[in-house]
Image (cartoon, grey):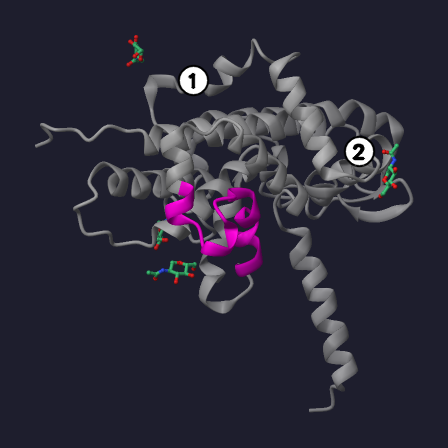
């Protein structure tokens, strides 16, 4: 009693903003990762997109890459919110699956890398054996995998537990008050769009695609390969992320700092490369899943 509607709306707004700060790459980041991936899909993967995605997507994965962010606030999906990130202990610049991949109740596998293994395995077993009873919803598995593959490439999605991956580090981005996590999810991309790309996301994506066939072309095969020829290797990506978080994201970004040109210009290349790597790795993972030939002599 006593709380006016206006007050409730205001509280809801503040909560939404707070929760929003804890999201992963913003909508633009996820769209970019998935759009880049689409350019590298093999034929079987393109066919799988048409089969699995909701009809309104018209086979365009990028249209549904932010779905896990859109639903995670609904009560029936709240359990998925811990699957967007993994934290390392205070000031540890390395990542270890067994030490780090759990939720706050120490449930093993409840983190972004665990979720990538989970949804890769679900899609693999459905793809390898179409006769088997499918226990899970493969549309959801595809949307989760595509989203989390983007998240694991955002350096502060493998950040320190103490500051919740930069969420509690309040900084200024030029003259706007925000937190360090949000800077890496949204602000660097936003500033790049207005500074270099005439506020056009398609233009930014085109430039990244061009870099993939020119400047980065020698690196792409390395980005594609997984140690031990696994279908997915999220542990490698999380290790890279915490390393970049320590070297670039946290550096010179203590609470109360104003981040401006120096930070923006030196960190933007990192963000661009992580978006591109996320796209390449999503594509190769999906290609491995959907072009997997049935194993005839499986026991
Ligand atoms: C794996 O996926 C299923 C289906 O969405 C879900 O019920 C389960 O909690 C997931 N586990 C992890 C660790 O992601
Ligand atoms: C699979 O999940 C999607 C997204 O949640 C939903 O729209 C669809 O109805 C589900 N399909 C089945 C067969 O439950
Ligand atoms: C920038 O975008 C606006 C529309 O948003 C367009 O009218 C203008 O021509 C664009 N400028 C350049 C240099 O592409
Ligand atoms: C990975 O696959 C390549 C090519 O199929 C093969 O030459 C190599 O031995 C494999 N490596 C491992 C560790 O299985």
Q: Which residue is mark 1?
A: 225
The alpha-carbon separation of the residues under discs 1 and 2 comes to 29 Å
Q: Which residue is mark 2?
A: 192
Query: Magenta residues: mostly which secondary structure?
Result: helix
- Picture mark count: 2
The image quarter in which residue 142 lies: top left
Q: Is residue 5 left or right of residue 138?
A: right
Quadrant of the rendering where the C terminus is positioned: top left
Q: Is residue 177 above or below residue 128?
A: below
Which residue is painted at 19% across and 40% down in the image?
129
Pinpoint residue 127: horizontal percent, then vertical percent.
Answer: 27, 39
Quadrant of the rendering where the N terminus is positioned: bottom right
Foreground pick, 282 / 8: 282
Q: Is residue 265 left or right of residue 45?
A: right
Ligand 4 contact, mark 1 (Cβ < 8 Å): no
The image quarter in which residue 34 lies: top right
Question: Disc 2 on helix, strand or loop?
Answer: helix
CA neighbours of label 1 inside 10 A, class few (<14), some (14 to 19), many (20+): some
The residue range painted magenta reads: 49-71
Pinpoint residue 47: horizontal percent, then vertical percent.
Answer: 38, 39
Q: Is residue 95 visible?
A: no
Let me know if residue 69 is in the magenta part. Answer: yes
Pinpoint residue 287: horizontal percent, then vertical percent.
Answer: 39, 29
Question: Disc 1 on helix, strand or loop?
Answer: loop
Whichever of labels 1 and 2 marks the residue nearer the N terminus, that label is: 2
Q: Is residue 42 visible?
A: yes
Which residue is painted at 81% across and 33% down in the image?
197
Q: Are marks 1 and 2 in contact (CB under 8 Å)?
A: no
Which residue is painted at 36% across and 33% down in the image?
44
Let me know if residue 251 is in the magenta part. Answer: no
């Amino acid at each position: 009693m006593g709380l006016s509607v206006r007050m409730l709306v205001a509280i809801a707004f503040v909560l939404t903003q707070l929760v929003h700060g804890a999201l992963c790459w913003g909508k633009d980041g996820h769209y970019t990762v998935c759009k880049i991936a689409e350019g590298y899909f093999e034929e079987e993967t393109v066919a799988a997109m048409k089969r699995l995605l909701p009809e309104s997507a018209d086979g365009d994965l990028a249209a549904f890459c932010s779905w896990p962010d859109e639903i995670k606030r609904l009560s029936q999906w709240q359990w998925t919110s811990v699957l967007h990130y993994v934290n390392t202990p205070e000031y540890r610049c390395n990542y270890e699956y067994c030490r780090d991949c759990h939720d706050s109740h120490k449930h093993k596998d409840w983190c972004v890398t665990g979720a990538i293994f989970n949804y890769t395995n679900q899609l693999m077993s459905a793809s390898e054996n179409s006769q088997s009873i499918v226990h899970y919803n493969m549309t959801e598995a595809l949307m989760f995998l595509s989203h989390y593959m983007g998240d694991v490439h955002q350096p502060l999605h493998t950040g320190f537990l103490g500051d919740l991956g930069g969420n509690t580090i309040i900084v200024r981005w030029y003259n706007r008050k925000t937190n360090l996590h949000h800077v890496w999810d949204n602000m660097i991309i936003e500033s790049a769009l207005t500074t270099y790309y005439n506020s056009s996301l398609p233009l930014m994506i085109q430039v990244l695609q061009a870099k993939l066939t020119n400047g980065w072309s020698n690196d792409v095969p390395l980005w594609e390969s997984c140690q031990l020829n696994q279908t997915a290797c999220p542990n490698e990506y999380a290790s890279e992320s915490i390393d970049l978080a320590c070297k670039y994201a946290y550096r010179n970004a203590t609470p109360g700092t104003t981040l401006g040109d120096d930070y923006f210009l030196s960190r933007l290349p990192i963000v661009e490369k992580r978006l591109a790597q996320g796209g390449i790795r999503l594509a190769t993972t999906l290609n491995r899943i959907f072009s997997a030939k049935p194993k005839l002599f499986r026991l």
